[in-house]
Amino acid sequence: MAEKLQNVFKVSCCIRRNTQYVRDELEKIGYVYHKSMKSLDEDRYIYTNNKQGIYFTTQYCILNDDIYDCEKNIDLFLALAALREDCIDQYQYFKLPISNRVVKCECHSYIDMWGDFEPPAPYPKKMTMQELIKHFTRRDILVIYVDSREDTKDLSLVYDGLDALIMYNPKRHKVREMLAYGKFDTVIMMGHGTPAGLFNKSWDDYLIDESFADLLKEKKCIGIWCYASDFARKNDLKGFFTSMFISNSYEALSCGIDADDDEIQELTRKFCTDVNTLIKDVVPIDEWIEKLEAKADMTNPIVKYNYEAMEYFD
């Protein structure tokens, strides 16, 4: 059995794909398999433990703040798993000078790979965890979904079938990290909130507030929570936003409308499905309000209230 490399690797990470290829690559990098209680082929997840130099498989999601979730991104998972604390460069990624090409070092040392460099010639630069996340996260859409109440469960219909990175009830620092280093053209934010931002799951703080504005300003944003449009206007964001959006009978009553939860949930499902279609059909966001209203029953007081308050900011 290979000797475990303790305290050598920098990052503990997880991938939601358990394949022989991934396991073989981890062992090439230097990880030792720690036998799980289940049959290895039945397990769905692979985890690395950077402090012990091991990897293991499991059927269960056991993520915490110390483990980076690579979802199903094999390239990112192996790149993060290869990051080391010692002087060995093999299997780690470097950015080459001048060309800025990203290349994996196949030798023990980058000098063995590319030769020595005489000053003032720049050296290849080893990529950091944040740079690797940015490089290997290639999806166009990031979904930040806070599912905190019964009336938010159907919001998942917005991203159904999309090739998107889904952050479900995420931690605030994870969202900030992903917005800072991920390559996303569009950010979808959904849940409950106020003009000050999007609530976290427990409603005891904001998941997204004005401190995220600089990270969102260069994105196409889709904000679906109560008064998301006020948040967008205040922070100069561009995209599609709802205002006060009735999603339950209590909110309807507070707006002077008599409706039960079943009716409102059905209307919410239609709205989410229609938004999903607009995204899949690549309809420009500035046309969304017109097209959503054209497909809606604007004689319904709930629909009329919700749809007439939607806004687009360029």
Image (cartoon, rainbow, N blue to C red):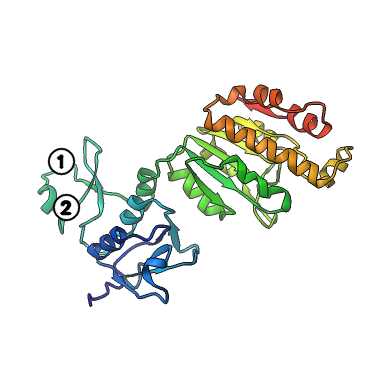
Q: Are marks 1 and 2 in contact (CB under 8 Å)?
A: no
Q: Foreground residue, 67 or 213?
A: 67
Q: Which residue is at a point 51% across and 33% down the rendered structure image?
A: 219
What is the x, y in percent for residue 66? 45, 64
Q: Which residue position holds label 1?
A: 120
Please state which amino acid type lies under the numbered disc 2.
Answer: Tyr
Between 191 and 269, the one lying in front of the other is 269
Q: Vertical placement of 106 versus 44: above or below? A: above
Q: Is residue 133 above or below residue 282?
A: below
Nearer the camera: disc 1 or disc 2: 2
Q: Is residue 112 left or right of residue 50?
A: left
User: Where's residue 87, x and y in %?
Assistant: 21, 62
Q: Is residue 236 toward the left or the right of residue 38 in the image? A: right
Which quarter of the figure has residue 8?
Answer: bottom left
Q: From the viewer's perspective, is 307 left or right of 239?
A: right
Sequence-wise, the earlier of marks 1 and 2 is 2
Q: Residues within 10 Å of mark 1 (few under 14, many from 20)?
A: few
- Mark 1 to mark 2 CA distance (whole Å): 17 Å
Would you say 119 lies left or right of 305 here? left
Residue 280 placed where, x, y %? Answer: 53, 32
Check disc 2 and report its element: helix, strand or loop: helix
Q: Quadrant of the C terminus?
A: top right
- Residue located at (31% from left, 71% from top): 33
Q: Residues within 10 Å of mark 2 (few under 14, many from 20)?
A: many
Residue 272 pos. (x, y %) = 65, 38
Q: Which residue occupies 21% across, 35% down? A: 98
Q: Amino acid at mark 1?
A: Pro
Task: Indicate whether 72 appears above or below 297.
Answer: below
For label 1, the SS is loop
The answer to whether residue 76 of the structure is visible from this angle is yes
- Residue designated by label 2: 110
Position of the N terminus by quadrant? bottom left
